[in-house]
Image: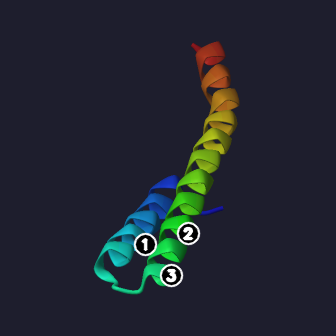
Amino acid sequence: MLSPRFLRMQAEKCLRSALATTDLGMAADLKRMARDLEGWANEAEKIQRVRRRPLLESSIALH
């Protein structure tokens, strides 16, 4: 699984490229790609939180 940080960095690159291009079709595609990447980053964060929760609960139980 890719990290949320990596996915957000890629989304930012897409947005910068969209702003730099004069091709409106390409800009629209890049913006859609950035939106998709941001959505995947949010999903990856949710998955990471769920995976960490049992670890946190077990470490609390040890104390």
Q: Which of marks 1 and 3 is nearer the N terminus?
A: 1
Give the image location of residue 39, x and y in percent. Answer: 59, 52
Q: Distance between the residues labelled 3 and 2?
A: 12 Å
Q: In this view, does 13 lie above or below 49?
A: below
Give the percent coordinates (x, y) of residue 7: 51, 62
Report if the CB atoms under discs 1 and 2 are less than 8 Å apart: yes
Note whether 31 is above or below 21 in the view shown.
above
Is 2 rendered above or below residue 60? below
Label 3 neighbourhood size at 10 Å, few (<14), some (14-19), many (20+)? few
Callout 2, which amino acid? Met
Going from the N terminus, do you reach mark 1 or mark 2 first?
Answer: 1
* Disc 2: which residue: 33
- Element class at badge 3: helix
Q: Which mark is residue 14?
A: 1
Residue carrying label 3: 25
Q: Is mark 2 on a helix, strand or loop?
A: helix
User: What's the residue type where badge 3 is placed?
Assistant: Gly
